[in-house]
Image (cartoon, rainbow, N blue to C red):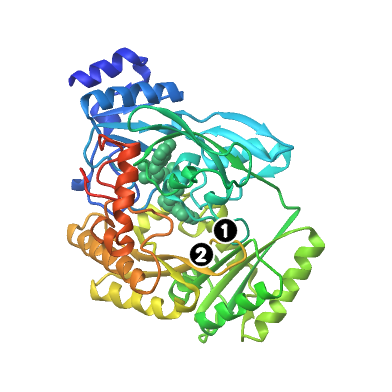
Amino acid sequence: MSEYIEELQKVLEPSKVLTEDFERFVYGADWSPRTPEEIYPPDVVILPKTTEDVQKVVQIAVKYKIPVTAGAGLTGMAGGAVPLYGGIYIDTTSMNDVIEIDVPNQTIRAQAGIPLQKLNEALEPHGLWLPNLPESKWSCTVGASIGCDNDSTFGMKYGKILNALLSAQIVDGSARIIELGHRKAHFTSTGYKLKDLLVGSEGTLGVITEATLKVEPIPEHREIDMILFPSMKASVSFLSRLLQAGICPEGTHINCKRRLKFYTHAYRQKYGKNPEVPDWAEALMALIFSGDHSVVKYHRDYAVKLAESYDGQVVKEREIVSGWWISKHTLEFEPFKQKWPDAQRVKKFGAADPGIPMGRLEEFYKEFIAIAEKHELEVLGMNAYLEHPFSIGFSLSCALFVDYRNQDEVERFRKYFKELTKKAVDYEGTMSTYMADTDLKVENFEYEHGKSTEYMVAIKKLFDPYGIMNPGKKFKRGE
Ligand SMILES: Cc1cc2nc3c(=O)[nH]c(=O)nc-3n(C[C@H](O)[C@H](O)[C@H](O)COP(=O)(O)OP(=O)(O)OC[C@H]3O[C@@H](n4cnc5c(N)ncnc54)[C@H](O)[C@@H]3O)c2cc1C
């Protein structure tokens, strides 16, 4: 056994240091398409309970120059938490305590490994919630949400984790414990906003151990509607007008026709009949309204009436709407008779996550189909999430079916992924909106960031002078 692992065993309790093959192997992959040959198990897994535990681990990693990868639920879709160079894997899910709920100030302080669902269960008796919720809220933790900057079902009203993050504690690559942020103040004009650097940092600057988040009152009432539009363009024009009228849905998702077929396929399986979906429908917009009953009713009625002027038609079969809501928010994906996350595993879902400006959705959709077809991959469909309060800018999930056992298909998926995410930069957008860079975007990193790449490399060195924090992600190892 390596000397550094023996040293880890001396400074931590034995139950916190896992070295058996069967214990390490499960940490070698996340939800990104990869074949069984492409699993990268770490050499040792640590289950810390406190920030001081993490500090002890990083001190040893610094001494021996061993890679340190922090991970959580391992549901990342691009390999962010996969320890490409082995070394130490810190399973942060063992740090899952709530530290403080401050009701008058509407904040929560928690350890980074708490899943978002558990965090909300702790907040619920106080009438509060953290709205930054991906589908994977049962496994996605606070630290991972900051680490990969995930999208939220409710992003149109509340934005992403950046809008909620007030302060965070990290153990950096020199094993220093630092707090970044401005306590419970929502904004500041002093100093540099270092806490914002953590959002999407993928553990490359340090291990997040605790965070203080702004939380919101639970809305009294929620209603969900789906509207069919003859084109994506029509759906975007409608949404723009709705916002201009002063109505901001809590969540808005636009699905392409293919994605619509995916949902209706599930419907057919469940109900044994065809849903009422007209041939002319090219886009399906899901709208979530929340607030007091009377306000929700007014907003919903206004939106439905307005949609008519854009040739929009409300989906009348409520089973389609509830099927979508179940798969989105509770993930009891009944049509496949499997509870999450097996449904995704069996369907072999692989996605790219580019971001594009509001006027280019339809055009980019065609690009997505063309690139997928060029690489001979089966299209599942595109979903556009709106993740910025009261504004339109798209975070896309461009999804395919990928056979994880087929090396050639997985390789073609990676080519597709790189080509499509790079194309988003040409569309005045960004390669990534909810998965961060991982190793898949390294080769096009400068293409997106140009000369600012140098500054980012310098920032990384400041936090991680020995290049041990999740090496190979964002930049090549050693850069
Ligand atoms: C069925 C399913 C549904 C999904 N739905 C959504 C969705 O609706 N929206 C969305 O955006 N994504 C979604 N995802 C993708 C994924 O779940 C999210 O990106 C989620 O945020 C990852 O959380 P995790 O805890 O599994 O993170 P992991 O995969 O374990 O880690 C993600 C990244 O965060 C870093 N990290 C984790 N913890 C820390 C820490 N303490 N300190 C520093 N860095 C850390 C890791 O190094 C890694 O780079 C879904 C995935 C699946 C499988």
**Image position, residue 63 (x, y; %):** 24, 23
Residue under the point 74% across and 69% down: 299
**Image position, residue 44 (x, y; %):** 27, 27
**Total numbered circles:** 2
Crowding at dot 2, Cα within 10 Å, few <14 / some 14-19 / many 20+, comes out as many
Q: Earlier in the sequence, mark 2 or mark 1?
A: 1
Image quadrant of residue 61?
A: top left
Three-letter amino acid code of the residue under disc 1: Gly
**Image position, residue 437 (x, y; %):** 33, 54
Instruction: Specify whether residue 341 is in view.
Output: no
Residue 262's disc is none
Residues at circles 2 and 1 in contact by the CB criterion of under 8 Å:
yes
Location of the N terminus by quadrant is: top left
- Residue position for label 2: 385
- In the image, taking residue 358 as reference, residue 127 lies left or right, namely right
Three-letter amino acid code of the residue under disc 2: Tyr
Image quadrant of residue 81?
A: top left
Helix, strand or loop for disc 1: helix
Foreground residue among 422 and 142: 422
Helix, strand or loop for disc 2: strand
Mark 2 Cβ inside 8 Å of ligand 1: yes
Foreground residue among 417 and 55: 55
- In the image, taking residue 160 as reference, residue 432 lies left or right, namely left
**Image position, residue 294 (x, y; %):** 82, 63
The span from disc 2 to disc 1 (Cα, nearest Å) is 8 Å
126 to 278, vertically: above or below: above
- Residue position for label 1: 155
| Residue at the limit of the structure toward the front, as seen here | 190
Residue under the point 65% across and 39% down: 107
